[in-house]
Image (tube, rainbow, N blue to C red):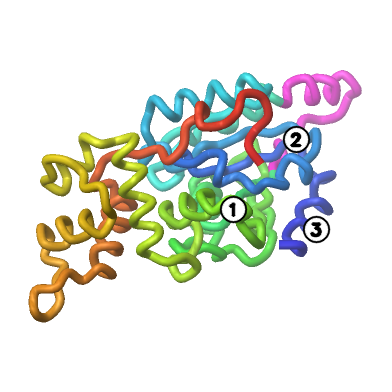
Amino acid sequence: MAKARRQVTEKLKLVDIIFELVDARLPQSSRNPMIDEIIQHKPRLVLLNKADMADKEATKAWIRYFSDRGIKALAINSQAGSGMKDISSAAQEILKEKFDRMRAKGVKPRAIRGMIVGIPNVGKSTLINRLAKKNIAKTGNMPGVTKAQQWIKAGKEMELLDTPGILWPKFEDQEVGLKLALSGAIKDTILNLHDIAIYALKFLEKHYPGRLLERYSLEEFPEEAVEAFDKIGRLRGCLMGGGEVDYDKVAELIIREIRTEKLGPLSFEHPSDFAAGEPAE
């Protein structure tokens, strides 16, 4: 992480704008806590990626949240390519005064130079490939695919600098780690799958109870997690020899079904979850 931070800091003077890519399902938890400190006052456009997987109303609330803090934000889906055209126009709008000053001084217009930053597995390389309209950046569904920096032309309007994902070395807030694990941003081996699945069930019970009960044919949600595992395991055939419920398989099932949208689009956090004023650390 220290190396990635140093690379970003060194390249800041070369770019006009920062494209901060976050997961639309958890825009605050998928931000690096140090990002504001690193980029300081550099113009920024927040891109809420995977917006198709997030609750639309929550995403609208997040766009207002960033706007209230003087930060432009867009909802995009780099995998499907939706919202790509809006990125260039939004960047031009943000940088209009700077480029007007350059033209007034007789400086020949040039492409916007942007740096894409974000935590691992949030979709940076997929975004670059979409903007460049070719497979230039290496992609993968595992965290940490991008290993080094590279400049990439995105048409005549933008030049982009990809960077390795920056992720803080430890999670001071366990819930942040659970949200990131549930979304697939960190490797499943880092946290206990049972803990992730239990967190997911409790979250769904509180925020999306109807979807939870319908998906697993429950009349009401059990008070104890083990009872919920038993009911879901028997319903879905997650059994071992002797008819015992295989809790490992149940945990994997719950996590997989959330990630593959079997319970519909979900947002794991809402602006109202955070104190008014400054973004959560």
Gap between marks 1 and 2 measured at Cα:
29 Å
Q: Are marks 1 and 2 in contact (CB under 8 Å)?
A: no
According to the picture, the residue beneath numbered tag 2 turns out to be 110
- Marks 1 and 3, the one that precedes in the sequence: 3
Please give the range of residues in magenta.
95-114
Q: Residue furthest right?
A: 105
Q: Secondary structure at mark 1?
A: loop
Residue 135 vs residue 189, the one in the foreground: 189
Of badges 2 and 3, nearer the viewer stands 3
Give percent across and percent down for residue 112. Answer: 71, 36
**192 on left or right of 48:** left
Residue type at numbered disc 3: Arg
According to the picture, the residue beneath numbered tag 3 turns out to be 6
Give percent across and percent down for residue 20. Answer: 63, 41
In the image, residue 161 above or below residue 69? below
> Which image quadrant is residue 113 in?
top right
Residue type at numbered disc 1: Ile
Residue 50 vs residue 32, the one in the foreground: 32
According to the picture, the residue beneath numbered tag 1 turns out to be 119
Residue placed at 64% from the left, 52% from the top?
A: 152
Pointer 1: residues within 10 angstroms few (<14), some, or many (20+)? Answer: many
Q: Secondary structure at mark 2?
A: loop
In the image, residue 274 above or below residue 242? above
Gap between marks 1 and 3 measured at Cα:
15 Å
> Which image quadrant is residue 92 in?
top right
**Quarter the C terminus occupies:** top right
**112 on left or right of 204:** right
> Which image quadrant is residue 198 in?
bottom left
